[in-house]
């Protein structure tokens, strides 16, 4: 049996097939993994959910496979099933993982074993056996359209009525984690009266972002090659408690959306749809996109990877200085290429124009080669 379901479709799958002995909950989105495990646990244990007798959690980096298998072989207490969750299995050495092979070939009928991890190495024998015999629940990061649907679904579950532009702002947080979006929705549920529709200003207020300092405004400043404005937006966000790594994640998310929108328009997509994605007047869409050439976008993603490495410990500079350096390079030199006449070549951003007013407390970080 080789069956795969999306995490958001798991409840329907359980309603059709019931609870089975083996599940592989796999994907980089930790919120979806945790929710899928919770759904499986509730379906398997039913009324015995709160007893605690039949639910055990192990981790691949601190538990032996023998302990997991011994627990999986036990008889459930005052219930029809046991649930065993084995997390972080990507950290299992291949030799340890192979100890699961005999159990995977003949799992205990009264136990539901849930093997969970961000990813599985498909070259290993035990992972091949797992994906062949288990139901695989896919928890990959959501695509743009899926994320929009997920936000509205989670908002409705919390009793939050949300305007489309406000949902668009929340999608920025989705570039980092669905947990981040969920936290913002929970704050909105407590902050906004249930009879009022959540607006963009509500999202910005609760995220600690001043009007004019969102990632959309940052993209606008970068597109206009306005170094000073971009640095002011960065400073305001940092002062309001936003971590530089989170700001980088939101910026990467926006660049991905920007690139995708350009491709859609080149393929005959409608400007109205692009305008909704970019939150701007349809008449401004093409002019805005022409500010970002394909070569600049390609270069930007190289800089994003370099900045991510520096923020995670690969630089002697402070995180704020690293982000300032990134913004200087992203603002760069205005593009003279149009949306349909771009050539795929790498451009080097121009230095700050001679005679322009310097920004205090800013220095450019140059990687030593």
Image: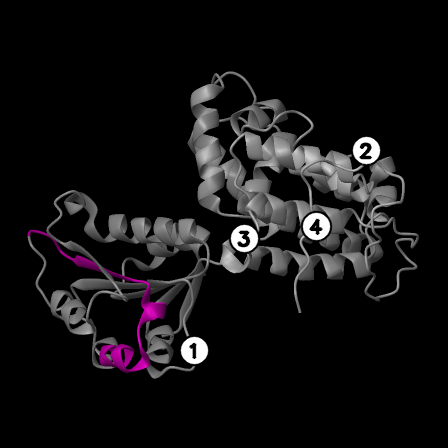
Q: CA distance from mark 4 to mark 3?
A: 15 Å
Which residues are the magenta region? Answer: 78-100
Is label 4 or label 1 in front? 4
Evaluate whether residue 164 shows in this view: no
Task: Give percent across and percent down for residue 112.
Answer: 23, 62
For disc 2, the marked residue is 281
Among the 4 quarters of the image, the one containing residue 343: bottom right
Task: Give percent across and percent down for residue 276.
Answer: 73, 38
**Residue, x 61% and y 60% (percent of image)?**
305
Q: Which mark is residue 364?
A: 4
Q: CA distance from mark 2 to mark 4?
A: 35 Å
Q: Which comes sooner in the sequence, label 4 or label 1?
A: 1
Q: Nearer the viewer, residue 23 or 32?
A: 32
Is label 2 or label 4 in front? 4
For disc 1, the marked residue is 122
Q: Secondary structure at mark 4?
A: loop
Q: Which comes sooner in the sequence, label 1 or label 3?
A: 1
Q: Are marks 2 and 3 in contact (CB under 8 Å)?
A: no
User: Any magenta on residue 174?
Assistant: no
**Residue, x 28% and y 82% (percent of image)?**
95
Q: Secondary structure at mark 2?
A: loop
Task: Give percent across and percent down for residue 182.
Answer: 45, 38
Q: Secondary structure at mark 3?
A: helix
Q: Which comes sooner in the sequence, label 2 or label 4?
A: 2
Q: CA distance from mark 4 to mark 1?
A: 43 Å
Q: CA distance from mark 2 to mark 3?
A: 35 Å
Task: Give percent across and percent down for residue 130.
Answer: 33, 74
For disc 3, the marked residue is 311
**Residue, x 49% and y 19% (percent of image)?**
192
């Amino acid at each position: 049996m080789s069956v795969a379901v999306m995490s958001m479709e798991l409840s329907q799958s359980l309603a059709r097939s019931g609870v089975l002995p083996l599940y592989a909950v796999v994907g980089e989105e930790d919120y979806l993994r945790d929710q899928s495990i919770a759904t499986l646990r509730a379906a398997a244990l039913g009324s015995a959910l709160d007893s605690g007798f039949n639910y055990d959690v192990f981790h691949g980096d601190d538990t032996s496979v023998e302990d997991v298998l011994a627990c999986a072989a036990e008889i459930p207490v005052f219930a029809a099933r046991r649930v065993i969750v084995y997390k972080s299995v990507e950290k299992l050495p291949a030799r340890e993982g192979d100890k699961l092979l005999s159990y995977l070939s003949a799992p205990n009928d009264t136990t539901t074993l849930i093997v969970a991890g961000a990813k599985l190495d498909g070259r290993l024998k035990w992972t091949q056996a797992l994906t062949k015999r288990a139901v695989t629940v896919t928890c990959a990061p959501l695509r743009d359209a899926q994320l929009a649907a997920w936000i509205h679904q989670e908002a409705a579950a919390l009793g939050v009525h949300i305007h489309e532009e406000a949902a668009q702002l929340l999608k920025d947080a989705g570039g980092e984690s669905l947990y981040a979006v969920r936290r913002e929705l929970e704050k909105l549920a407590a902050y906004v009266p249930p009879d009022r529709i959540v607006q963009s200003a509500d999202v910005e207020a609760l995220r600690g972002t001043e009007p004019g300092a969102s990632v959309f405004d940052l993209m606008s400043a970068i597109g206009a090659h306005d170094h000073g404005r971009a640095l002011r937006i960065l400073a305001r966000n940092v002062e309001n408690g936003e971590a530089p790594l989170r700001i980088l994640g939101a910026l990467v998310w926006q660049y991905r959306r920007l690139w995708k929108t350009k491709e859609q328009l080149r393929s005959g997509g409608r400007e109205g749809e692009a305008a909704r994605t970019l939150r701007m007047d349809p008449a401004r869409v093409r002019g805005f996109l022409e500010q970002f050439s394909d070569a600049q976008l390609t270069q930007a993603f190289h800089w994003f990877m370099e900045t991510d490495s520096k923020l995670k410990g690969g630089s002697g500079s402070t995180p704020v200085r690293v982000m300032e350096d990134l913004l200087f390079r992203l603002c760069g030199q205005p593009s003279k290429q149009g949306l349909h006449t771009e050539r795929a070549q790498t451009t080097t951003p121009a230095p700050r124009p001679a005679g322009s007013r310097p920004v205090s407390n800013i220095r450019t970080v140059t990687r030593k080669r």
